[in-house]
């Protein structure tokens, strides 16, 4: 480290001392690598008390004899300027490189691969629903929708379920609370089927009518492998002049064959719904065993899929259609049922858990 020498004379020795000092401050400055060393350098050279500049002031300038004072004074001023400049430059170098370091540490590496978020996939229930909608749209049906919170009138009364009729017991549901002051027909409930959209459609449209009504429905059912209190249905309604039961059969046979293949057979058995007469339960030949009998079809060779029938003339009375001129059919089917068949799923509850391990399989 540099030490200020005493001067032997004020010519050659002064020259030598000045050169050595300037070389020394340059070397020391170059060796500085961080802010702490920089501060030390500054103190060593520029501290008022005993800094190198103070020392040369004392040892060189003050000690110089009269005739040399002017010359030594100029040299000392030059040295001071040079030392200040060198230390200033060093401070800037250190500040700059620490800013560099900070930038480096804070830098976002935009070349890193991002977080991949997997694309969602269509829920299997929606897939089947969309497939089925496609089949009916090709046959000229349009899509109608109605509210999930429905009035007693649309869910029951206009569908020919009179108040207190026992047929209502088969479709128990949640009723909105505190509606006792309303007339029964206006009381709200979670719809138990998509059939109320039949009524809403006929109120809005003049015949001929061909609509399908997909949607969510609710029933007071205890969950098990084939029941869940929320599920989806698709309703169909066709009203025109001269619509017969044969049209119903042909339409449903075509729809089932579109979904399950052209070898599938349909079977119609008598049933009861208040809003269709006659009413039928429709089954298809088991697409798994071709009708021989297996576990999914409980060895019967048939799988029951939907309810249907010819629109009951009483229903036309509720919507101002003339039953003497018009006839039509309606059907309603559970989508989860179809999805279980299509994808070989053995528990309907899987559709509602939202478990990715299940849903991913349909990607
Ligand atoms: N709405 C009936 C149900 O949910 C099904 C159905 C619809 C029956 C249309 C006949 C006609 O059970």
Image: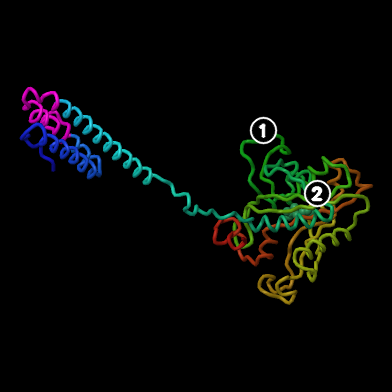
SS of the residue under disc 1: loop
Residue 283 left/right relative to 36: right
Magenta region, residue range: 43-72
Q: Residue at point 82% right, 55% down?
A: 138
Q: Is residue 282 above or below residue 29?
A: below
Residue 326: x, y in percent? 91, 48
Front residue of 254/324: it is 254
**Which residue is nearer to you in this view: 92 or 103?**
92
Distance between the alpha carbons at the discs numbered 2 and 1: 38 Å
> Does residue 17 lie above or below 310 as drawn?
above
Q: Which residue is mark 1?
A: 181
Q: Is residue 67 magenta?
A: yes
Viewer-closest of 61 and 341: 61
- Residue 202: percent from left, percent from top: 83, 43
Q: Position of residue 207 (x, y in %)?
A: 88, 45
| Residue at (65, 58) in percent of width and height | 124
Secondary structure beneath disc 2? Answer: strand
**Majority secondary structure in the magenta region:** helix
Tell me the crowding category of disc 2: few under 14, some 14 to 19, or many 20 or more residues within 10 angstroms, Cα based. Answer: some
Of callouts 2 and 1, which one flags the residue occurring earlier in the amino acid sequence? 2
Label 1, residues with CA under 10 Å away: few <14, some 14-19, many ≥20: few
Q: Position of residue 78 (x, y in %)?
A: 20, 29
Please give the residue where the numbered disc 2 appears in the rendered image.
Answer: 142
Q: Quadrant for the N terminus, please.
A: top left
Q: Indicate whether 98 appears above or below 130.
A: above
- Decide whether residue 28 is among the magenta residues: no
Ligand 1's quadrant? bottom right
- Looking at the image, which is closer to me, 196 or 263? 263
What's the residue at 5%, 35% (across, down)?
Answer: 8
């Amino acid at each position: 480290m540099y030490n200020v020498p005493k001067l032997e004379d004020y010519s050659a020795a002064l020259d030598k001392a000045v050169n050595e000092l300037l070389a020394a401050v340059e070397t020391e400055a170059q060796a500085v690598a961080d802010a702490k060393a920089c501060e030390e350098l500054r103190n060593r050279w520029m501290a008022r008390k005993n800094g190198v500049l103070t020392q040369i002031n004392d040892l060189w300038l003050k000690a110089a004899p009269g005739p040399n004072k002017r010359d030594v004074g100029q040299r000392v001023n030059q040295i001071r300027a040079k030392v200040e400049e060198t230390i200033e430059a060093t401070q800037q170098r250190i500040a700059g490189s620490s800013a560099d370091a900070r930038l480096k540490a804070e830098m976002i590496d935009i070349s890193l691969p991002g977080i991949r978020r997997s694309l969602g996939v269509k829920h299997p229930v929606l897939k089947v629903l969309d497939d089925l909608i496609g089949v009916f749209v090709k046959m000229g049906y349009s899509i109608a929708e109605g509210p999930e919170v429905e009035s007693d009138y649309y869910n029951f009364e206009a569908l020919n379920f009179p108040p207190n009729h026992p047929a209502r017991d088969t479709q128990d549901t949640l009723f909105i609370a505190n509606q006792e002051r309303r007339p029964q027909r206006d009381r709200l409930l979670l719809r138990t089927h998509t059939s109320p959209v039949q009524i809403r459609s006929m109120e809005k449209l003049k015949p001929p009518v061909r609509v399908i009504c997909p949607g969510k429905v609710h029933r007071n059912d205890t969950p098990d492998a084939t029941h869940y209190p929320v599920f989806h249905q698709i309703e169909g309604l066709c009203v025109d002049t001269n619509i017969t039961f044969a049209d119903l059969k042909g339409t449903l046979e075509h729809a089932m064959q579109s979904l399950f293949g052209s070898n599938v057979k349909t079977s119609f058995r008598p049933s009861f719904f208040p809003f269709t007469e006659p009413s039928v339960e429709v089954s298809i030949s088991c697409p798994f065993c071709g009708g021989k009998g297996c576990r999914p079809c409980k060895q019967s060779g048939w799988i029951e899929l939907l309810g249907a029938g010819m629109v009951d003339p009483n229903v036309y009375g509720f919507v101002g259609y003339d039953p003497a001129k018009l006839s039509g059919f309606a059907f309603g089917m559970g989508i989860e049922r179809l999805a279980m068949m299509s994808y070989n799923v053995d528990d309907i509850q899987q559709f509602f858990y939202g478990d990715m391990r299940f849903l991913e399989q349909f990607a």
